[in-house]
Amino acid sequence: MELRRYWEIIKARGWLVVALPLLVLLFSLLTYEPKPPMSAYDLRYSVAFTPTYLEEMSTDPALAAVQATEYIVDDLTGALPGTVFGEMVAARLPQSTLDELRAGGEMTDGEVIVNTILPERIEKTHRLLSISFATPTDELTMPLADAFKATIAEDLTPWLEALWSVAPIKMELVSEEGPYDSREGLPPLVEIALRLFIATVAAVAIAFLLDYLDRTIRNREEVEAIIGPVLGEIPSE
């Protein structure tokens, strides 16, 4: 009975359940502007920490080195999207490239570089570290990729050694991919489908709210709920 009652509520205001998703669909189609793809680049590094062999060590030096390496990789996932690393990379790029990446925004050179990094795609797997970044064009991505690789090879390792007060730390490039087209956000069809789903749920919720606020007596059950048993009724047809 409850399901039948719910269906009657939806059917009574079917125009709303249909109209709202249609309006959302029409609005989505009229305002849709495909975003131009970004030029992305992926770098994957192996991080290694050379074990130190000392007398009277209570742990295996090789095992301690592996554990220390994982701590270093953890630190790198937070350091790479930071402005310190960004300033290191920016120092290797010509000002004209930085100005193009800045695109008129008020950012420091380090913030410009950080803005290109895709933080959701910085991944770590034990002693492997992946970093991705994107720019509007391949012409900007390639020199940025060279600056990233040079900075990691020549500047980042000494910085880590000073930070941890140990040496040597090695970061070896194991793979790179790019430039390739990358689009931010959900695919267009998925985004529109998600909007339609939300609009449909909202329309059904509004239909139930309107039914709750409507004090009109519509059937025998509602009359009996108010005044008691009904002895007779006039057919609706």
Image (spheres, rainbow, N blue to C red):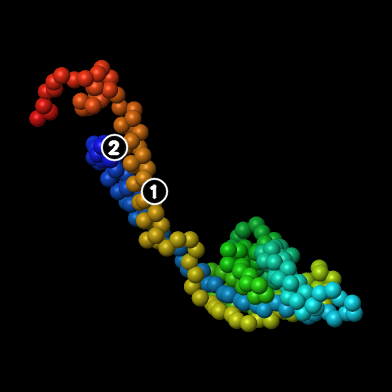
Q: Nearer the viewer, residue 231 or 113?
A: 231
At label 1, the amino acid type is Ile
Most extreme residue toward the top is 227
- Residue 46 appears left or right of 65: left
Residue receiving disc 1: 198
Q: Quadrant of residue 144?
A: bottom right
Q: Residue at x 39, y 60 (%)?
A: 190
Q: Secondary structure at mark 1?
A: helix
- Residue 28, horizontal then vertical, whole percent: 37, 53
Q: Residue at x 63, y 82 (%)?
A: 174
Q: Nearer the viewer, residue 234 or 46?
A: 234
Q: Residue at x 77, y 79 (%)?
A: 62
Question: How many numbered marks, from 0 up?
Answer: 2
Crowd band around label 1 with a 10 angstrom C-alpha radius: few (<14), some (14–19), many (20+): few
Q: Nearer the viewer, residue 198 or 51?
A: 51
- Residue 166 appears left or right of 197: right
- Residue 41, horizontal then vertical, whole percent: 57, 74
Q: Does label 1 or label 2 sit earlier along the sequence?
A: 2
Residue receiving disc 2: 2
Q: Nearer the viewer, residue 83 or 107?
A: 83
In which quadrant will I find the N terminus? top left
At label 2, the amino acid type is Glu
Q: Relative to residue 5, is residue 62 depicted above or below? A: below
- Residue 189, horizontal then vertical, whole percent: 37, 61
Q: Residue at x 21, y 27 (%)?
A: 219
Crowd band around label 2 with a 10 angstrom C-alpha radius: few (<14), some (14–19), many (20+): few
In which quadrant will I find the C terminus? top left
